[in-house]
Amino acid sequence: MNKLELQRAANEVRKGIITAVHGAKAGHPGGSLSAADVFTYLYFEEMNIDPKDPKKADRDRFVLSKGHTAPGLYSALANRGYFPVEDLKTLRHLGSYLQGHPCMQETPGVDMSSGSLGQGISAAVGMALAAKMDGKDYRTYTLLGDGEIQEGQVWEAAMFAGHRKLDNLVVIVDNNGLQIDGKIDDVCSPYPIDKKFEAFNFHVINIDGNDFDQIDAAFNEAKATKGMPTAIICKTVKGKGVSFMENNAGWHGKAPNDEEYATAMADLEKIGEELGGAN
């Protein structure tokens, strides 16, 4: 896909996020919206996947370590054809296969159940090591929150990945600067994030995670990097695309009411019109 097509797809993913969280009357829109461009790039451009065969053996793997942003993952999966977009409205409903956190037993396209912060990267490291041990070519990607990397287990996994030279692993940090309690550097600063990953023998790339040119260049650079894992630190805007949610920690884990939903969808419709895409 070209840049404009990716921007249009990401806008549809954002609409799906708002629709899902509004339908659930619960969920995490802020970090889902900030990472929507990364989700879109992974599922529409980067990863070797097949929605018709979600479990194909040689597929690339993705682990959503910050599992609370499941609405973003689900919307990307739905828009990519893993299941109907209409089903996003059932998020968190009794009997729905779209649970509040990703469940690999229930949801097509989900490679690992996640939600307990810090654990997803460990699972991803295990997948990358398995590929190396089995002589397989698939790559593994994992998305972490910048608040999540306050967890110690993240750094145990990073130490192992760097030591094992897992160049088939890409760790992505959604650095939107906010967590549930406020600014990450007020709660427990993880900065400098890049220097920490470098200390664990990662190749590190710093980008604007809401810019597809930079996202594309970073993932291409990661593919070309041999002998060490890559960490892509994505500076993003929490709540990206929805005027009243942007850079507002209060929208970390809160659903819009009907009026707020209408405003949010109008914001995204406007963006869609500016991109010349279907609304």
Image (cartoon, rainbow, N blue to C red):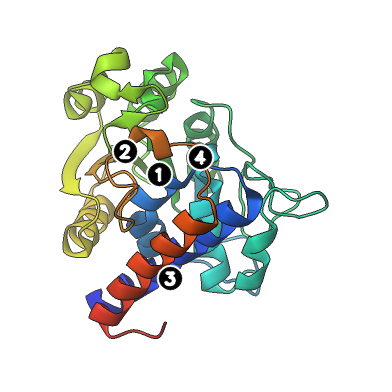
Disc 1 vs disc 4: which is toward the camera?
Answer: 4
Sequence-earlier tag: 3 or 4? 3
For the residues marked 3 and 4, what is the alpha-carbon distance in whole angstroms?
20 Å
For the residues marked 2 and 4, what is the alpha-carbon distance in whole angstroms?
11 Å
Residue position marked by numbered label 4 in the rendering:
254
Sequence-earlier tag: 2 or 3? 3
Q: Is residue 142 above or below residue 214?
A: above
Q: How many marks?
A: 4
Q: Looking at the picture, which amino acid does disc 4 mark?
A: Lys
Residue position marked by numbered label 2 in the rendering:
248
Sequence-earlier tag: 1 or 3? 3
Q: Residue at position x 37%, y 24% from top?
A: 149
Question: Do callouts 1 and 2 mark residues in contact (Cβ within 8 Å)?
Answer: yes
Label 1 Cα neighbours within 10 Å, binned few <14 / some 14-19 / many ≥20: many
Indicate the position of residue 266 as horizontal and vertical percent values. Answer: 38, 69
In the rendered structure, find residue 187 and report the number of the disc placed on it: none
Q: Looking at the picture, which amino acid does disc 2 mark?
A: Asn
The answer to whether any part of residue 136 appears in the image is: no
Sequence-earlier tag: 1 or 4? 1
